[in-house]
Amino acid sequence: MVDGSGKGRRILALWLPRLATDARHRARPEPEDGPPLVGVREERGRRILAAVDRAAEAAGLRPGMTLADARAVEPGLAVFDADPEAEARLLARIAGWCTRFTPWTTPDGTDGVALDVTGCAHLFGGERALVALVTERLAMAGFESRAALADTPAAAWGLARFGPAARTRVPPGGQRAALDPLPLAALRLPPAVVDGLFAVGLRRIGDLHAVPRAGLTARYGAEVARRLDQALGRLDEPLSPVLPVAPHRSRIAFAEPIATPDSIAAAARHLLDALCRGLEAAGEGLRRLELTAHRIDARFDARFNAGGDDAPQTVAIGTSRPVREPKALMRLLAERLERLEPGPGFEAMDLAAPVVGPLGAVQAGFGRDGDDTALGELVDRLGNRLGERAVLRLVPRPGWLPERCVAAAGPLVPAASVPLWPADLWPDDRPRPVRLLPVPEPVEVMAPVPDDPPLMFHWRGALHRVRHADGPERIEMEWWRRTGEPRDYYRVEDQTGRRFWLFRQGLYRPDARTPWFLHGFFG
Amino acid sequence: MSTPTPARLAELRATIRRLEGVGAGGGRVLPLGVPAVDGALPDGGLPMGCLHELAASDPGAGTAFAAALGARLAERTGGPVLWILGGRDLHAAGLAAYGLTPDRLIAVRATRTADLLWAMEEALRCRGLAAVLGEAAALDLTASRRLQLAAEAGGVTGLLLRLDPRHAPAGTAVTRWRIAAAPSEASAEDGPGVGPERWRVELLRCRGGRPGAWTLEWRGPGWSGPDSSSPDSSSPDSSRTSEAAVRAYALAHVA
């Protein structure tokens, strides 16, 4: 069942009036009839109530009272220091948790969350059911909340805080009738403006309609008309989501939570099919795929820390080229699904393609194209298990030092588009070893000085007599990179035919020994 | 009982090789270009689409021989070679001299043996590749059997390069080779330094072929070796004769 009109936005505003005290109650579970709890902050040397729980409010305590006054009213108070930063973090986590209902969620002020649920409500059984679901879930987690769903963020904000019911759903286009009876504070106006309007007899939002706009703006500033227009939908008010929303995504919500690997894989396959259809329509393929799974038992364990087991679980894969073949993507994704921890079950899953690239209409080809596709899939499988930087091409790079003359490139660099290996970078007349030790190993060498090749050398406990030698090839340090002594390289062959690359570090000096190193092996 | 015709004999041989797991590449073979060696291999070349093992105690000779084989396979099939290794010491500038240029080589780094074997198996099933070269240290019979099956399924040639000869050989490789460096002989034209590289190449086992040992010299884009069709034995004496043959051969070609 789909509530609401097909066009236009639908915004759900959540208000958590007792965010700070609810979090404390959860952290230190106390009996229901425990002492009233208040949070206090310092203000000009006085301690002021910042948050009050339901029991404290019932006792007549309100935010803004001094702690001394509150103690006079209610001597048995439990007191904690308000921590606005921790509360902001907690609110951000709740906003992140809300991405299970829609990707567009954002913390709203210090105690609210705004969700753009346009086109999402039918996944949860309609708008009324969605509003009920959100507040019930928060109640299960220990948070008191009020929620309102309307066409505009402003109307939903006002109704959540000042509406007559804890759960409000305004039908599309009905925000004027719903807002008219609310006090002016529901328009998010500064208290001074509200007081000013109150003084001239304007108390409810409905009162404003009769007042000429020009006069309102002249006297109270443009804010009043702007907020009214935003609430009624005459002026657009964008929401910016917590996380960037990928252009291609699909989502599935489950009537019953799912926990078995089979059902998770089936859901992923379903999402992939939908996502790939969208990519095909756009002529694109994805380079990165993220699956986010939302657990049913999110509890916001109120240690106020970010992370924790209630955060939605995300697994991601990358591909070396744009892909939109569901089967190939599923093979990549399947291995990652094992990392998900469903616990009692997932209630929703999101699949998003945050990075896409152009991809022609036909992906499967014949002959060489087919081979390229197969190779691309292989590279992706290897990269996703071993790390993207583990699968490479080794291409020449301008540089004098042997250890710097090879650069890593993507494995699927098309040979035609880039000159992969300009021959002059690895010249034929300067033989290079097939194995190059990452760190040259010191060797003991007997060499006539100053420039003769070594006669023999000790390496790893064995003596190698040099039968043939080429060199020296002098390689200077790259002056723009670091300073160092030049190296004189010799290619030598020992009595068994093994060929080594040795170098002497530094110029010959009669008074000092120059160190020798083994740097590689020739074929 | 009729006399078997040559066609019938060839057919029977192909059947036997298929049963032995050699013919999975559709009977495709890769000639090494040295008549003596090719003559010892079934159908005149290294069978493609199956697993081969190269053991070498000298990392230089083993790597270069494997690179030259890989380059030949890449040239033949048009696809790249996947080289899967655990270390960081492979030097592409040196491999290019044996024909394994950057457009023909994709390097894969897998530090754990389990990952390396998994990557090899995955890659052997991928038809777009010319060869999969893996530097596996320890390999049990099951693992090598899996690799052989994957190579048969994908038609990709697998080369197991074992630079640590202490480990036991792979059980199921179709051919097993031992590669070692051999002293070079610089000819007058080459000058006094290190001559063209030579390798002592031993074919230790070959299903459908004959073991043998040869000394091969690397000349530009290929090997040269002894002209004689009969491989020498591995005794030092005949090794020397083989070197003489190489020299004669090489000199004949230079002249």
Image: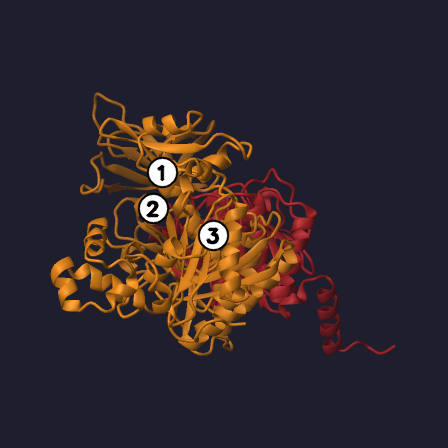
Chain colours: A orange, B red
Q: Which residue is mark 3?
A: B108
In the rendered image, the quadrant that contains the N terminus of chain B is bottom right
Q: Is residue B2 above or below residue B78?
A: below
Q: Which residue is mark 1?
A: A62
Instruction: Confirm whether residue A424 shows in the render.
Output: yes
- Mark 2 secondary-structure assignment: loop
Pinpoint residue A62: horizontal percent, then vertical percent: 36, 38
Pinpoint residue B195: horizontal percent, then vertical percent: 39, 48
Q: Nearer the viewer, residue A225 or A390?
A: A225
Q: Crowding at label 1, few (<14), some or many (≥20) Cα neighbours within 10 Å?
A: some
Q: Which residue is mark 2?
A: A110
Q: Is residue A113 above or below residue A46?
A: below
Could you tell me the amino acid type at mark 3?
A: Val
Q: Chain of mark 2?
A: A
Could you tell me the amino acid type at mark 2?
A: Thr
Q: Is residue A122 above or below residue B164?
A: below
Q: CA distance from mark 1 to mark 2?
A: 17 Å
Marks 1 and 2: same chain?
yes
Marks 1 and 3: same chain?
no
Pinpoint residue B15: horizontal percent, then vertical percent: 74, 69
Could you tell me the amino acid type at mark 1?
A: Arg
